[in-house]
């Protein structure tokens, strides 16, 4: 028997995106509990942000999703805050800069528990509803899939700051690749890298999670269109081979291509048109 929320829709504990968010909430809380207090001020790849700042950001966004307001301290004095968007993102981080790791752990656990409950009580109609998303108009379900992506990326920011690799396999990673990366690749290949009509591109991700994406560029009614291919071409214009961790750091703008290759010369390789391949890798960043 399913429970009913106050709007009369069935509760959504079995909704796939709720299960994904719940798993990611658990991963974030477990990571926060694992890190010694002395490491919370370690720097991350994000300008101006420490390990603690990443957790504070997660708290701030999820509190906003709960409709909870809080003070907005001045942030204009911070060098990495250079526009209205970065100021908005920075406010909940700055608000918690003097908090202890113990305080952040407690608030993180409480906030994510409340978010889990709210999501489980939201009926299917709520997830199907039209919604703003960072990627443009969509449904609330689309928005929550982006929240999975954002939370996982910031978990990885923390892990890289501490040289603590992990959570590079499993349903959350598969969701990020399927729902976020796959949607962005045609735009990256066709527009940013300016692949010509007739080009085919294959991106092979290597472990711990392996995946293959194929993009084809066609001319349709006199306009160039890039889209995911139905099958992997036998002789693509270029093939990019890259490990999933490096790939996602490039997608998140956490590192540039030269730095990634400098740190690990085998991280990225090309077969075929390496000029096009490098143009694609150089323009992978698609997260704010």
Image (cartoon, rainbow, N blue to C red):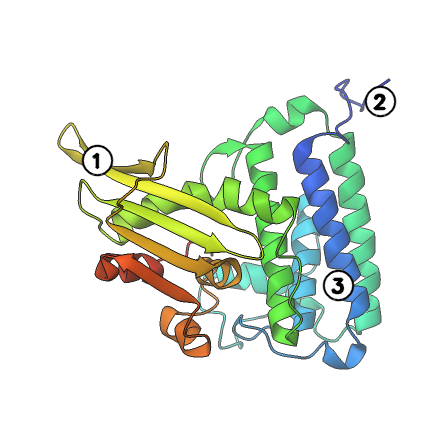
Question: Residue 3: which disc?
Answer: 2
In percent of the image, x 74 and y 44: which residue is there? 22
Q: CA distance from mark 1 to mark 2?
A: 49 Å
Q: CA distance from mark 1 to mark 3?
A: 45 Å
Mark nearest the camera among 1 and 3 is: 1
Q: Is residue 260 left or right of residue 53?
A: left
Tell me the quadrant of the picture where the N terminus can be found.
Answer: top right
**Circle 1 sits on which residue?**
218
Residue 267: image x %, image y %? 44, 67
Residue 60: image x %, image y %? 68, 56
Q: Is residue 203 left or right of residue 155?
A: left
Residue 176: image x %, image y %? 55, 46
Mark nearest the camera among 1 and 2 is: 1
Q: Residues within 10 Å of mark 3 (few under 14, many from 20)?
A: some
Is residue 203 shown above or below 257? above
Q: Nearer the viewer, residue 65 or 216?
A: 216
Q: Is residue 99 left or right of residue 276?
A: right
- Marked residue nearer the N-terminal end (1 or 3): 3
In percent of the image, x 22 and y 44: which residue is there? 199
Residue 221: quadrant of the picture? top left
Q: Are marks 1 and 2 in contact (CB under 8 Å)?
A: no
- Marked residue nearer the N-terminal end (2 or 3): 2
Q: Residue furthest front?
A: 234
In percent of the image, x 49 and y 63: which residue is there? 249
**Circle 3 sits on which residue?**
31
Residue 235: image x %, image y %? 26, 45
**Residue 134 visible to the viewer:** no
Q: Nearer the viewer, residue 9 or 146?
A: 146
Q: Nearer the viewer, residue 252 or 261?
A: 261
Is residue 38 shown above or below 285? below
Q: Residue furthest bottom?
A: 38
């Amino acid at each position: 028997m399913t429970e009913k929320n106050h709007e009369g829709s069935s509760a959504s504990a079995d909704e796939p995106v709720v299960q994904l968010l719940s798993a990611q909430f658990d991963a974030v809380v477990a990571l926060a509990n694992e890190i010694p207090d002395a490491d919370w001020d370690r720097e991350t790849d994000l300008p101006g942000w420490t390990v603690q700042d990443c957790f504070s950001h997660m708290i701030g966004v999820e509190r906003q999703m709960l409709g909870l307001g809080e003070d907005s301290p001045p942030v204009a004095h911070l060098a990495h805050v250079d526009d209205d968007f970065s100021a908005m993102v920075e406010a909940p981080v700055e608000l918690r800069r003097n908090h202890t790791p113990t305080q952040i752990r407690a608030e993180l656990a409480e906030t994510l528990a409340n978010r889990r409950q709210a999501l489980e009580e939201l009926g299917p109609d709520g997830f199907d509803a039209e919604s703003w998303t960072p990627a443009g108009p969509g449904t609330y379900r689309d928005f929550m899939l982006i929240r999975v992506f954002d939370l996982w990326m910031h978990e990885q920011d923390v892990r890289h700051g501490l040289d603590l690799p992990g959570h590079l396999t499993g349903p959350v990673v598969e969701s990020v690749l399927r729902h976020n990366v796959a949607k962005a690749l045609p735009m990256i290949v066709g527009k940013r890298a300016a692949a010509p009509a007739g080009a085919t591109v294959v991106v092979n991700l290597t472990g711990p999670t392996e995946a293959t994406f194929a993009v084809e560029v066609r001319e349709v009614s006199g306009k160039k269109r890039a889209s995911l291919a139905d099958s992997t071409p036998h002789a693509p214009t270029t093939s990019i081979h890259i490990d999933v961790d490096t790939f996602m750091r490039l997608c998140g703008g956490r590192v540039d291509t030269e730095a990634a290759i400098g740190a690990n010369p085998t991280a990225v390789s090309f077969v075929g048109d390496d000029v096009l391949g490098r143009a694609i890798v150089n323009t992978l960043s698609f997260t704010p």
